[in-house]
Image (spheres, helix red, strand yellow):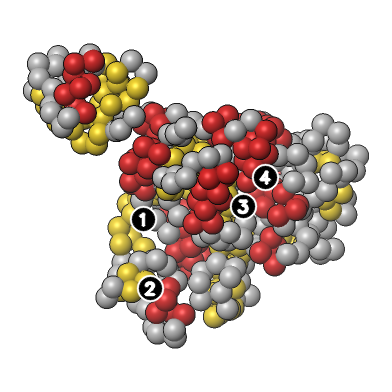
């Protein structure tokens, strides 16, 4: 038996990407595969969660494409505290009493959209004279990494209604409370905060409240900030945050709010846009205009943003730099990858569900085909004779298709990634099935 394709893991908090790969290897060995080939398409830090593409068999030859592809993240910046790692794991290095308003945050986002330069965190996997930067930093060395150019395609405040339903993908993939076993927020029956409860339909609601509309400030490449009201279903990026919690609560092991409720008697969360001081209004929907007005009365302790970025972009650096541009300091309190290459969060499966599927239905039941990682490359149908040539390292001739990259297919079997130029096909990567 052999398995070739992708398992898209929803990596939980607290484990490394290598741990996720090791878990899949153990499941494959348990299924009778003695020497499974397994790799992943993009490292996630232990404090990060979300989409981790894991390649099996011949799909491991495509992991480089995942590393080079764009990625999307939801992340929470906790204002007022800087850390040595730029996330919730490191020791505090600086504090500030300054807190930005929502309007100030929206005004600064265009400066971090498009082509920008950033300095990677000292605690990163980049090498300095052959040694990982984080190892030098842990040894007490001062690590000063060079600025690097990256592109932020889109950067916006996450849309989150005051009383949001959980997204359908999470309801479908996780029984309520499954994540609590790994260190998150609610229980099967319901209480997720002093005035929030989860109903039988899986929605989080305040006592006696009704779901309201959401508001967002969004900044695309070169676009200005704007305020709009949208339905809860229109926001895909907000979904994981209501589970993961803002301001590092999940890392501290403390209690979190459900996205619209109280996190302490004095701190209220304004429609998922960030924590701010004030009494708030319980049990009532809030319009987008009122949210903006309320949020601007006081500075925010945190803000949750969504970003789509190119290879090599450090979200920790982005958060640090945004906070400094706002006249304060900050660090990443929550980080969740929502898209990696062609794989969105909707395709991901939790470790618990992966183990259950492996035991009851087999890993093949959750395996995406190898070609799922090549959705941006057109298929090129080849004859058995042409497939034979490609498998033996020979090219193609006389093809009428336009120049470009193709995945050569012998019926439903991938043969090779090829580049066509003037009718001639050169092999970029061959597959062995």
Q: Residues within 10 Å of mark 4 (few under 14, many from 20)?
A: some
Cβ atoms at labels 1 and 3 below 8 Å apart: no
**Disc 1 designates what residue?**
312
**Earlier residue among tags 3 and 2:** 3
Which secondary structure lies at badge 1?
A: loop
| Label 4 vs label 2, nearer the camera | 4
Cβ atoms at labels 3 and 4 below 8 Å apart: no
**Disc 2 designates what residue?**
133
**Measured along the vertical axis of the image, is residue 161 above or below residue 372?**
below
Going 54% across and 56% down the picture, which residue do you hit? 19
In this orientation, which residue lies closer to the viewer: 237 or 59?
59
- The number of numbered discs placed on residues in the rendered structure image is 4
Q: Which mark is residue 12?
A: 3
**Disc 4 designates what residue?**
352
Which secondary structure lies at badge 4?
A: helix
The alpha-carbon separation of the residues under discs 1 and 3 comes to 22 Å
Q: Is residue 67 left or right of residue 202?
A: left
């Amino acid at each position: 038996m052999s398995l070739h394709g992708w398992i898209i893991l929803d990596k939980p908090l607290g484990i490394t990407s290598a741990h996720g790969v090791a878990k899949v290897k153990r499941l494959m060995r348990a299924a009778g595969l003695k020497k499974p080939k397994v790799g992943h398409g993009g490292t996630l830090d232990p404090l990060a969660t979300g989409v981790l593409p894991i390649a099996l068999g011949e799909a491991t030859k495509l992991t480089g494409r995942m590393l080079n592809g764009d990625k999307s993240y939801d992340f929470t910046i906790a204002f007022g505290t800087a850390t040595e790692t730029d996330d919730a794991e490191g020791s505090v290095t600086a504090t500030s009493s300054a807190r930005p308003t929502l309007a100030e945050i929206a005004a600064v986002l265009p400066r971090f959209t498009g082509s920008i330069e950033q300095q990677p965190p000292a605690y990163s996997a980049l090498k300095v004279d052959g040694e990982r930067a984080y190892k030098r930093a842990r040894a007490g060395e001062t690590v000063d990494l060079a600025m690097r150019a990256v592109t932020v395609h889109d950067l916006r405040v996450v849309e989150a209604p005051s009383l949001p339903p959980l997204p359908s993908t999470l309801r479908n993939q996780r029984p309520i409370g499954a994540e609590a076993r790994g260190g998150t927020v609610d229980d099967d029956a319901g209480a997720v905060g002093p005035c929030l409860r989860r109903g039988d339909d899986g929605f989080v609601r305040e006592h006696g409240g009704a779901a309201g509309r959401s508001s967002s400030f969004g900044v695309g490449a070169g676009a200005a900030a704007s305020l709009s009201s949208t339905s809860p279903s229109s926001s895909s990026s907000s979904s994981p945050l209501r589970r993961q919690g803002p301001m590092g609560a999940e890392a501290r092991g403390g209690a979190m709010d459900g996205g619209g409720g109280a996190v302490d008697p004095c701190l209220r969360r304004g429609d998922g846009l960030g924590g701010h001081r004030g009494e708030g209004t319980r049990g009532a929907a809030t319009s987008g205009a009122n949210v903006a007005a309320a949020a601007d009365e006081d500075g925010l302790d945190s803000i949750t943003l969504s970003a789509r970025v190119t290879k090599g972009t450090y979200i920790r650096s982005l958060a640090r730099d945004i906070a400094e541009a706002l006249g304060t300091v900050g660090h990443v309190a929550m980080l969740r990858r929502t898209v990696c290459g062609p794989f969105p969060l909707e395709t991901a499966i939790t470790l618990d569900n992966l183990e259950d599927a492996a035991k009851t239905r087999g890993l093949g039941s959750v395996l995406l085909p190898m070609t799922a990682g090549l959705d941006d490359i057109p298929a090129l149908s080849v004859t058995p004779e042409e497939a034979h040539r490609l498998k033996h390292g020979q090219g193609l001739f006389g093809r009428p298709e336009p120049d470009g990259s193709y995945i050569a297919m012998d019926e439903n079997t991938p043969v090779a990634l090829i580049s066509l130029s003037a009718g001639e096909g050169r092999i970029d990567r061959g597959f062995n099935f």
